[in-house]
Image (tube, grey):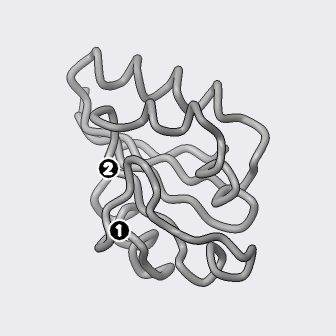
Amino acid sequence: MSGNLGIFVSSDRHLHHLLGIARAAHAAGKQVTVFLTHRGVLLTREPAFAQLEGLARVSLCQVNFQAWGLQGPVPAVTREDFASQARHAAMIADCDRYMVL
């Protein structure tokens, strides 16, 4: 079985699922990459979002983040990971498995 899981998040309703999937994949030795867009960027304001730190590389759509009036810093997201949809495309190209939440 391959070792890279890409997770595309466009909803602000499933943080508990995102955390559970990331924990399980990380525990199984998988590399996890998350890209947040649309309403998914709103998850960055949930206190539990910080639990992704160390479980996944998290990137987000900077345009959507700004459109919602949000400001950094964001736990688990580096300055370089405020990105464009090109990062999403790169995630798809680099992952062995891909899922949408």
Based on the displayed image, in which of its 4 quarters is residue 68 positioned?
Answer: bottom right
Residue drawn 49% across the image and 58% down it:
35
Q: Taking 59 as reference, is 46 above or below it?
A: above
Query: Against 50, is 88 above or below?
Result: below
Residue at position x 56%, y 53% from top? 8
Residue visible at 36% across and 24% down in the picture: 25
Q: What's the amino acid at mark 2?
A: Arg
In the image shown, does 19 or 101 lie closer to the viewer?
19
Would you say the residues marked 2 and 1 are in contact, meaning their CB atoms lie under 8 Å apart?
yes
Q: Quadrant of the C terminus?
A: top right
Rendered position, 100 above or below 70? above
| Amino acid, disc 1 | Asp
Residue 41 appears at what percent x and percent y? 64, 60
Q: How far apart are marks 2 and 1 (CA)?
A: 9 Å
In this rendering, position of residue 53 left or right of residue 69: left
Residue 75, how many percent across, how many down? 42, 48
User: x, y (%) of residue 81?
Assistant: 35, 68
Quarter occupied by the N terminus: top left
Number of callouts: 2
Question: Left of 69 or right of it: where is 6?
Answer: left
State the image quarter where residue 3 is shown: top left
Q: What residue did someone put label 2 on?
A: 57
Mark identifier at residue 36: none
In terms of depth relative to the viewer, which is nearer, 10 or 15? 15
Residue on which disc 1 sits: 81
Q: Which residue is drawn at 50% across and 25% down?
A: 21
Q: What element carries label 2?
A: strand
Q: In which quarter of the image is residue 30?
A: top left
Could you tell me which secondary element the residue under label 1 belongs to? Answer: helix
* Residue 54 x %, y %: 27, 34
Q: Which of marks 2 and 1 is nearer the N terminus?
A: 2
